[in-house]
Amino acid sequence: MKIQIDGDYDDDTVRAIVTALSQHLGRSVEIVDGESAEDYADEGVILTEREERLREEIEDIASGGSEKGHAKIEELGKAFVRDRIDMVFDEVQYEDGSFAGYANDERTPADGMITGIGDINGRDIFFSANDYTVMAGSLGQQGIEKEIRLAERAVTARSPIVRLIDSTGARLSPDERDESSSHAGRYTGGKSFFNQCIHSGQVPQIGVLYGPNIAGSAYTPVFCDFLIMVEEISGMAIASPRIVEEMTGESISMQDLGGPDVHATHSGSADLVVSDEETAAKKVRELLSYLPQDYRSPLPERSTSAPARNPKGLDAVIPDEPNKSYDVHDVIDRVVDGGSFFELKPRFAPEIVTGFARIDGRPVGIVANQPEHISGAIFPDSAEKAADFIWKCDAFGIPLVYLCDTPGFMVGSQVEKQGILQKGRKFIYATSNAQVPKFCVITRKAYGAGIYAMCGPSFEPDATLALPSAELAVMGPDAAVRAMFSQQIDAIDEPQERKEFIEEKKEMYRKDIRKQASSMQVDELIPAGDLRVQLESRIDAYRDKRRIERDRHHGTVLF
């Protein structure tokens, strides 16, 4: 028997109590440490056999799966799920469903799925986590039920959800082949995807992928609002390499089929790829620092900090020549709080940059054309990337700052086949319908429909600001001169004369931003060095911007 003795007793007194109690009961007695002794200083506590047994069972469940399962994660270079949870959370407040699957013939602690509530910087965060030591993290019926309950309760509690995903998919056994356990049943796997869909935009959903995720279960990470993949150990695909080879004849590795590089660079499904599990935990915590508890909650603010680079040096960053490249990160570093830029999808469609930052301590979303990459032209992938980010910012009340320097949407047969119009409309649609505070900053080029997507004057921004380097036009001078004077240009034989003619016409065509400011095409023409201060004041002014209820069920453009 184990007992707890509270109070200020010396060692001799404690030994006397234990000896007397052991002789009286006729059994051995062991002392255990107690909690809150100061509250019960005059009261000893005896653990009954049934409570002792229960605590032993809980301890056994917490140890996870078999020795073979623990050896497997060590071989794969993965952390045990409870160590993984400890990396992410300051403290786990409680768990639900620890005894799920406990009575199964085969030992499946917690049915391979841990669910509960953890604390991050004083915030309640609901979580689910697959235990790979239990049948490779496969999804049993009780585990799925736990995930379903967790998601529904998180929405009721108005709290974010973090999913630590490390599952090989649905668990198959001879007993589960009858119709009553169909994956399409009302309270089975499909229900968890349904919940992710209807909860989208209600509470933030963050997924971290630690292993290969195959078939239907691969939808769990992609239905999350944000997805972090761990290099080398993670992957996701609609079918395994073996099935792919059987069905198509293609022989391919898991990494080449659906590894982090595939989803970070080509599909755009991964928001971040990190080198290890410790970094993944750090990124989850950072990401949550920009997000509210739910769509109605205030944004988490911090004390302001100065930009990493001097805001007064901004004008020198932006070249006079409209086609000369520069890195838009040099602009962002002079506008946002130092060290606060949290870029998302950096390897996907790099011609547009998206990410969270803080201005004067307040979270904002940054959408910026990247002149350093294909002149900042908008391609099908970059249009979809920007639209997705804008829609998430609008869902969670995060103000948007657009940094516009683009020649517009890319042209040509290749992008037409890739859906430049179909995907481009999503970008324009998201900008049109977002009702958070929106600020358009024309840093240099704003040509054609590019300014539509980047929240130009027609798209009801709360301000359109122009820097002295700005140029707002239907098309760039080169294209305009060629369109209007092609015959005259072709008729000039002498190269120098042709060059001078083109330059003269380009100067005639080039728009003067001062004249455009005079005619109120922009709200304000400002010195570049004042942009940071202007944005601070304007974001503060629209802190309580109201939303408008549109007279419709919803729009018809689907992301």
Image (spheres, rainbow, N blue to C red):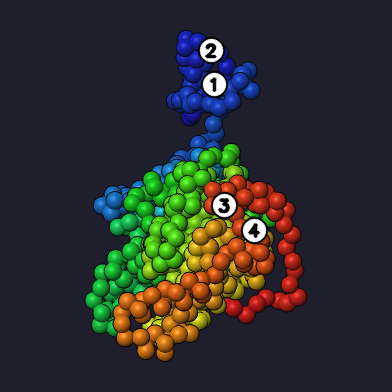
Q: Amino acid at mark 1?
A: Ile
Spatial separation of the CA atoms under disc 2 and disc 3:
74 Å
Q: Residues within 10 Å of mark 3 (few under 14, many from 20)?
A: some
- The location of residue 179, given as percent across then percent down, is 50, 78
Q: Dot 2 corresponds to which residue?
A: 9
Secondary structure category for the residue under label 4: strand
Q: Which of the two discs, 1 and 4, labels the residue nearer the N terminus?
A: 1
Q: CA distance from mark 2 to mark 4?
A: 76 Å
- Check disc 4: other Cα within 10 Å, few if <14, some if 14-19, many if 20+: some
Q: Is residue 317 left or right of residue 538?
A: left
Q: Residue 333: where, in percent of width, then height?
A: 47, 49
Q: Is residue 434 visible?
A: no
**Which label belongs to residue 527?**
3
Where residue 57 appears, x then y in whole percent?
46, 44
Q: Dot 4 corresponds to which residue?
A: 524
Sequence-first disc among 2 and 4: 2
Query: Would you call the spot at circle 2 few (<14 residues within 10 Å), some (14-19), or many (20 or more)?
Result: few
In which quadrant of the rendered view does residue 473 lie? Answer: bottom right
